Amino acid sequence: AFVNLALYRRLSACSLSLLCVIRPASAFTLTSFTSIPRFSSFAISSPSTPPASLYSRLYSTMADDEAEADPPPIKFEFAASARSTCKRSGEKIGKGEARMGVANPQHKGSYSWYKMGCNVAGVKQPKTKNGLTCKISKEKFFSDMLVLGYNKSTVTVSPGAYAEARKAQTGADECKFLFDNFGDIEGFDSLSDDSKVALCEALAGPSFDASDLAAVGSKRKAPLSSDDTAPPTATATAT
């Protein structure tokens, strides 16, 4: 019995060594081990996992997908063709014309395009103490948030983040992407003078002069022509 057991163990070792020569030891997985008083046996199986090279290809593909998963919420550019239409005014955007896009969450990588001057819909104030999250910086803000876009295709950003995104995406052409149509911004007139100036500087650029504040807003009147005369101003006299 001692001889038989020694012979069995020697043969088992030779078989295992032969298998390891044919395939590397790392390619096998020990799945079970059985022990009895006189004999020991091993169960070895090949792995069901794909090779490391396939893992690396899959990982790189997933990394590329994640990199493309979050396009910028707003995009400034010159129109490459004349096929796009402003979603707010309904007018065609000419080739080479400055435009701003709002990302469409239902169609990754696509944008709703707006003419500069139609891209800012209003100013929004948070209704709760939790504030509003800027879609660009992901930070919380508690006043004077810009609503960009129109109808259901809108995004909420802070004025500062809007200005930084415009500068980063347009560079030396930033002056062609400035906004000055404050009369169409809902809620602009309800802002304080300081908030109006800050908003105007973010939209119209740092060259905006605070002394021009009286000329902006939805209640501003068209400037008089050279042939018109300003109506007299009535003054009340105390008695």
Image: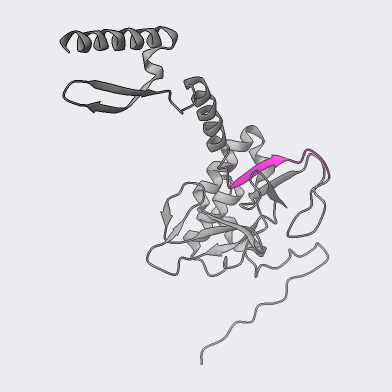
Quadrant showing the N terminus:
top left
Along the line of sight, the residue nearer the viewer: 41 or 46:
41
* Image position of 208 with respect to 77: above or below: below
Q: Is residue 115 visible?
A: no
Q: Residue at x 66, y 49 (%)?
A: 107
Along the line of sight, the residue nearer the viewer: 93 or 41:
41
Along the line of sight, the residue nearer the viewer: 134 or 166:
134
Residue 152: % across, % down: 64, 63
* Image position of 147 with respect to 30: above or below: below
Horizontal side, residue 149 vs residue 143: left or right: right
Residue 201: % across, % down: 55, 50
* Image position of 120 with respect to 74: above or below: below
Q: Residue at x 77, y 60 (%)?
A: 89
Q: Residue at x 80, y 63 (%)?
A: 225
Horizontal side, residue 85 vs residue 190: left or right: right
Instruction: Kindly indicate the quadrant of the structure image that contains residue 29.
Output: top left
Residue 194: % across, % down: 47, 59
Residue 73: in magenta span: yes
Q: Is residue 96 visible?
A: yes
Q: How many marks?
A: 0
Q: Which residues are magenta?
A: 72-82
Q: Determine the residue located farthest toward the front in the rendered image.
A: 1
Along the line of sight, the residue nearer the viewer: 182 or 14:
14
Q: Determine the residue located farthest toward the bottom in the rendered image.
A: 239
Residue 72: % across, % down: 58, 43
* Image position of 198 with respect to 43: above or below: below
Residue 94: in magenta span: no
